[in-house]
Each structure stands twice: as C-alpha cells, then as structure tokens.
Amino acid sequence: MVDDVTLDRHLVGALIEEHAGWSAVFAEDGRDALALIKLQVPDVVLTDLQMPEMNGLELVEAIRRDYSYLPVILMTAHGSEEIAVTALKAGAASYVPKRDLARDLIPTTQKVLDMARNQQQILECLIETEFRFLLSNDPHRVQSLINHLQDHLTMMNLVDKAGLIRVGTALHECLINAMEYGNLELTSDLRESEHSKAYRNLVDERRQLQPYRDRHVLVTARFSREQAAFVIRDDGRGFDPSKLPDPRDPANLQKCSGRGLFLIRTFMDVVRFNEAGNEITMIKRRH
C-alpha cells in the first residue's frame, strides 16, 4: 500500500486487515515501494497517484517494466483523473476513487486478484513459447529485457532464485558483448581500468556513427517445460572465441577479455557459436 499521507495509509490498512487472510505492507512513495517489492513481491500493489520522489504513474511504469505480472490498483483523488487515465494505459489493472474506498476497495482488489490467479492457472498450462526482440545498441534496455526473460524462467519453473541470477548474469554479458564488441567493434584493451573512460567515450561516439548506429542485436528466446534456449546475434563481423585468453590463468586475472565468456560457460548448460562468431546459443536445462 503506497501513499505519502499517513492517515490514508492507516485507513487503507484498516480496510485490508479486516479482510480475512490479507495483510498490508506500507510504503511512503514509489521508490520506497520498489525497494520493498525487491525484497518480497506482493500479490497486488495499491498506490496513490500524487506522491513525492516517485509518483503513482512512475511506479506503474516501473512495475510494468520489471514485474510484468504484478497487478497495480490506483487510488484516485479528485483532480488526478488525467494522470489516472495515463496510468491505466501504462498498465495499471484498475482504480478506486478515494472517496469510495470503504465501499469499493475490497471488491475491486478481490476482482483483480481473482483475474491474476486465473491468468496464472492458464499460464501453468503453457508448454512452449518463443519471443524475438530486436534491440538497438542502447544498454538501458538490457536489464528490462533480462527481467522479462527471468519472469518466464520463473513461470516455467526452470530455475531457482540462484539460477535466475546466474542466467541473468550470462544474458547481460552476452547482450553487452553483442552491442559493444560485436556491433560497435570495440576491443577489451580499452576496457582495462586505466582506459575505462576512453572506452566509454568511444562507445558513446560509435553509437552515433555509421555503420555502427544502424546495427542491431536480435534476441530469440524459447521456453519449454524442459529448458530455455537463448540465441543472441549481432550485426558485427564476429570473432573467434577460441582465441580469448583463459581467465583462470593467474596471468589473466586482471584482464577483462575472456571473463564474460567464462561466466557464460559456467552458468549455462550448453554454449555454442555460429561459424562467423556473431551468434551465440545458450541453453539452460531444468535441474
């Protein structure tokens, strides 16, 4: 329950606690709410719209991006109608006018929870699905995509929490490598600590230049009850993975080169490249 007004939090808390089997965790604004959600994902989020730090619309957008199956219900005050419409279009599940909380909050929340549970029951019948994404060389989209793929790993019950982190790490390494080493044709030499600023400057420069700026990363993700397969392909010239230094060698411990591929091979069950070296296939099997 997210609201910066203490009295409103207590009011909603009292209504929630009266409903058998329900309990509420309270946050003062959107940032506080996201921190709590990260610790434990709730069944539903009830949020005010007008709040400092991060308002209800921004919270809806963040939850939609990072917790796509978590429903959000808006609590709307007079004068917030326009932002409420925007939030509903952004992905909120429903809304309750604050003046009608005593009458409508519990039935609205129950309806949203029932729909979410029905959706989960249908998803449990899913045996196979495939997604294809075309990314520009913008690293800010990488984590959102990883979160989406992790949701499906959880939905298909393929990995535990530790496995989610390992697969997420492998995906992050692959996606950043495809963008920077593949499409932008950078090398790991500049990524060493004393050259890191020059490396970042070159990344920003090449994102604006031809032919680099028009290159993309194609991501194909296939999920079944037995495994998840990820195919990541860039538009670069490719490379020979056999020529990367072994990061386990003490002489290479301080080098960036080879570390990402070492993590990928450690965390995934199958890792293979195409002949050109610009496409990697990773498979994570159910354990």
Image (cartoon, rainbow, N blue to C red):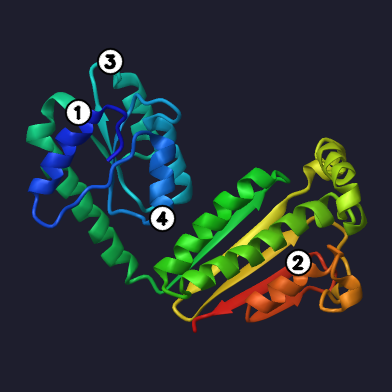
Instruction: Specify whether 57 is left or right of 81.
Output: right
SS for callout 1: helix
**Position of 93 compared to 175: left or right?**
left
Asked if disc 1 and disc 2 are in contact, CB closer than 8 Å, the reply is: no
Q: Which of the numbered marks, if any, corresponds to residue 197?
A: none
Amino acid under label 3? Gly
Q: Nearer the viewer, mark 3 or mark 1?
A: 1
Q: Residue under label 2, please give it.
A: 260
Residue at image x 85%, y 39%? 201
Q: Is residue 33 visible?
A: yes
The residue that mark 4 highlights is 39
Query: Dividing the image into 4 quarters, which one contains the N terminus?
Result: top left
Q: Which three-letter amino acid code belongs to the residue tagged 1?
A: Leu
Distance from disc 2 to disc 4, alpha carbons, whole Å, reads: 28 Å
Question: Which element type, helix, strand or loop, lies under badge 4?
Answer: helix
Q: Position of residue 234 (x, y in %)?
A: 76, 57
